Every structure is written in C-alpha cells, then in structure tokens.
Amino acid sequence: MLGCKQIGKKAKGIVARDKKVISPSLTREYPLVIDKAEDVWIWDVDGNKYLDFSSLIAVMNIGHSNPYVIKAIQKQLKKATHAAFSDFYAELPVTFAEQIVSVLPRGFDRVFFSNSGTEAVEAALKLSRWNKRKPYFVSFINSFHGRTMGSLSLTYSKPVHREGFGPFLSVRHVPYAYPYRMGSECTTMCLNELEKALYKGDVSAVFMEPIQGEGGYIVPPKEFVKGIRKLCDEYDVLMVDDEIQAGCFRTGKFLAIEHFNVKPDIICLGKAIGGGLPIGVTVASKKLMRWPHGAHANTFGGNLLSCAAGMETLKQLKRVGKSVVKKGRYIMRRLDEMKDHYSIIGDVRGKGLMIGVELVKDKRTKKPAIEEREQILWRSFFKGLILLPAGRSTIRIIPPLTITIEHIDRGMDIIEDAVKSVSR
Ligand SMILES: Cc1ncc(COP(=O)(O)O)c(C=O)c1O
C-alpha cells in the first residue's frame, strides 16, 4: 500500500529532534523522513512506501540506488575517495571531464569541477567577470541560481531568499517571458527590457535558465531564448546557461537549451550529473577558460567518489534519456484532459519530464491558488506520492526518467484525486 494515514511515530520523533538541532532555514513542505529508496520508490522510517514524482529535487534522474552507480562508487571507495584534485592530478576527473565535453556542443572543451549547483554558478560569475571586466550582471525575475552570495545576487524568485542579505553583487533583474501570465507579446516586451539593461555596455554576463525551475516551471517561447543570444552578441556580453535543474536529459535532450537551437558561452551543471553525490560543473571554451594558475580552485572539486558516480550516471542517462519525450507527452495528455475538467488547473506546460501545473482560483483572473496547492501536496503525500512546489502556485512533476507508464498512471491518479478534492 502507498502512503500513510497519519505521520508515523518514528518520523514524528525525528522531526522533533531535527527542530532542536537543524537550522530552521531549510524548506521542508511536509514531514517525509526518508529511510531508503530504490528506482522510483522511497520508504520512510516507519516503513511507508511512496512513489517519487520529485526525483528529490531533480537529482535522481536515473532512479534511486541505481545498481551500476552503487557498483562504481563501491569500486572507487576501495581505492581512494579524495585526490585534492586542485593540487594534484588524478585520472578519474579527467576522464569524466572528457565524457562531459563529448555530450556538449562543439567548442565546450574546458571543465571546472565543484560540489554543488551554486558553486557552478559562482565559477561562471567569476569566469565571466574575469573575461569581460564589467561591473554588472543580468538575470531574470523568477530565476533561481543558488543561495551563496554571488548566485543569490542573481536569484530573484522568492523574497525570503534575499530579504536581509543585501548588499548584493551588481545585478539588473529583467522580466522572463512567461506566456501564461504575460500573453503573446511577452517575447518582445522582455527582450526590450533586456536591451535596456545591456545598452550602457557595463554588463559581463546574462544568466538564464532555459526553463525556469524554482520560479514556477516557466517555459519561454523559442524566440525569447534566441533573442537573448542575439542581444548578448550585439552588446558583447557572455550568455550563461544554468542547466542545473533542466539539464541531464530531464527535458529529453542533454541540455534543455538545445530545444531552442541556441549555443550559450558558459554552461552550469549540477544536481543529476552526480547521480546522488554532490557535484557542480562549469564548462566553457578554452578561449574563455584561460584564467591563470590559482585564480579559481577548491578542495573537493573533482572528488573521486562524485566523479565515479557521475561517470556511471552519464552512461545511464544516455540510455534512459531516449524514453523521456514519450513519457512526458503521456503525462501532458493526462494533464490537458484534467485541465478541461477542473477549473483550478490554469496552465500545464513543460518539456520532456520537466512539467509544471499552475493552479489558479479562477481561470479568468488567474489568481494563484496558493492554499489549494498546499492541500494537494499534503493529500498526495498521505496517498503515497512525493511532489514538490515551484513558484507561487505551481506543482512540479519531475519523476526519475526511469519511470514506467504504469507508475506514471498511478501517480497521476493520486494527483487527480487530490485536485478533485480541492475543486469546488
Ligand atoms: C537552476 C538552478 N540553479 C542553481 C541551483 C543551486 O543548486 P544547489 O542547491 O546545488 O546549490 C538550483 C537548485 O535548485 C537550480 O535549480
């Protein structure tokens, strides 16, 4: 049986201990206390079983406890875990870098390893500033690029991320094309705003997500992404593509930006590329990545366990990546049918298995259905489905790419039940 009738005894105890010792700044939605996980399934500490439609924040694209990844980690564990790759050499990170380069568009031939998405973005900030020497950066409203001070300066999705943390790096935030809320003129309007932010010639780089994640799973029109590229070329500004959430075949292609036929200057990867171990990857051309000895480095980048896991993950990603488009279409069809039935579903959008369902109180006013979204997340949790929110009233549907149609149906039935119960 999936889910639980009420929060289990062990889970309650751990949550109570957590409250006494862990920083309250974390973003828990409901009390799932994880014990173990396998493929698309998660078990909590009380033995309840859940279907995972979150990939635990877009990380477990190849499924939990992938046996090939476990084997690769175990093999490396017996040899060495850490090589201080900034100070010494090791073959594994070099081979992994070669493999990453081989799945990227031509010209991306230099790799910098770190330990998280935010560090991949920090490296991109420094690399673009070092190359262009201009004081400003540009990022988009609703964007999320991380929470360390540099990446936080770019992030602009929720006030709580920024309140009390200024002053920030010099960043101009401009609107991101959001067809559902801005209408068909959004591309022109947003590109005009971007041009205003660039025309003084004081910007080093524009940071963008090819599909906004945390900000609400917003899929921009193709012309918007192409327009960003064009303006970056016109004003001699670098274009940084943050693929930390949307990359790694989540959308059916290795990079989400490939759907828009646009080639950025710098690519940031994280989350799924480590197959569950921490890693950040920043990739650029050898022409851009020519900063000198000591200009940027770290202790754990190129960690041997993360690279062993990442290499096997990349192999598995190539295999499961092929099925993503078909599965995504199947989910979108079900959601489109639901949209016709339930007035609370305002918009359904996505690419591959990166899908957002935006909930509204009324299809005409589009007022965000914030409380209803909360209720749907909780109801789904009790029925055995793990979902995450995005933006003000959107639900993310991002299962492991290994999910089957049968399990998709099981999860969609739970979502439909929850939507029905909060619909008037
Ligand atoms: C698009 C994007 N960039 C950067 C980050 C930051 O990654 P991390 O939490 O690993 O620092 C995230 C995390 O959600 C993200 O979605």
Image (cartoon, rainbow, N blue to C red):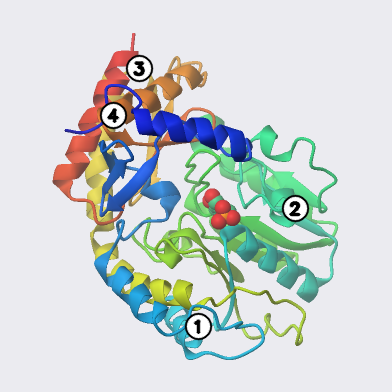
x 44%, y 31%: residue: 13
Residue 52 picture location, percent across and down = 31, 43
Q: Residues within 10 Å of mark 1 (few under 14, many from 20)?
A: many
In the rendered image, which residue does mark 4 sit on?
Answer: 415
Does 195 sit left or right of 356 as displayed? right
**Camera-nearest label, 4 or 3:** 4
Circle nearer the N terminus (2, 1): 1
Inter-mark Cα distance, 3 to 2: 40 Å
Does 330 sit left or right of 392 as displayed? left
**Number of marks in picture:** 4
Image quadrant containing the N terminus: top left
Q: Secondary structure at mark 3?
A: loop
Residue 185 picture location, percent across and down = 57, 38
Question: Quick check: marks 2 and 1 in contact, CB under 8 Å?
Answer: no
Location of residue 389 with respect to 101 vertically, above or below = above
x 34%, y 80%: residue: 75
Q: Amino acid at mark 1?
A: Pro
Name the residue nearer the viewer: 380 or 325. Answer: 380
Q: Amino acid at mark 3?
A: Ser
Q: Which mark is residue 149?
A: 2
Q: Which mark is residue 93?
A: 1
Location of residue 405 with respect to 199 vertically, above or below = above
x 46%, y 85%: residue: 92
Q: Secondary structure at mark 2?
A: helix
Inter-mark Cα distance, 1 to 3: 51 Å
Inter-mark Cα distance, 2 to 4: 37 Å
Circle nearer the N terminus (4, 3): 3
Inter-mark Cα distance, 4 to 1: 41 Å
Name the residue nearer the viewer: 87 or 320. Answer: 87
Q: Amino acid at mark 2?
A: Met
Question: Quick check: marks 4 and 1 in contact, CB under 8 Å?
Answer: no
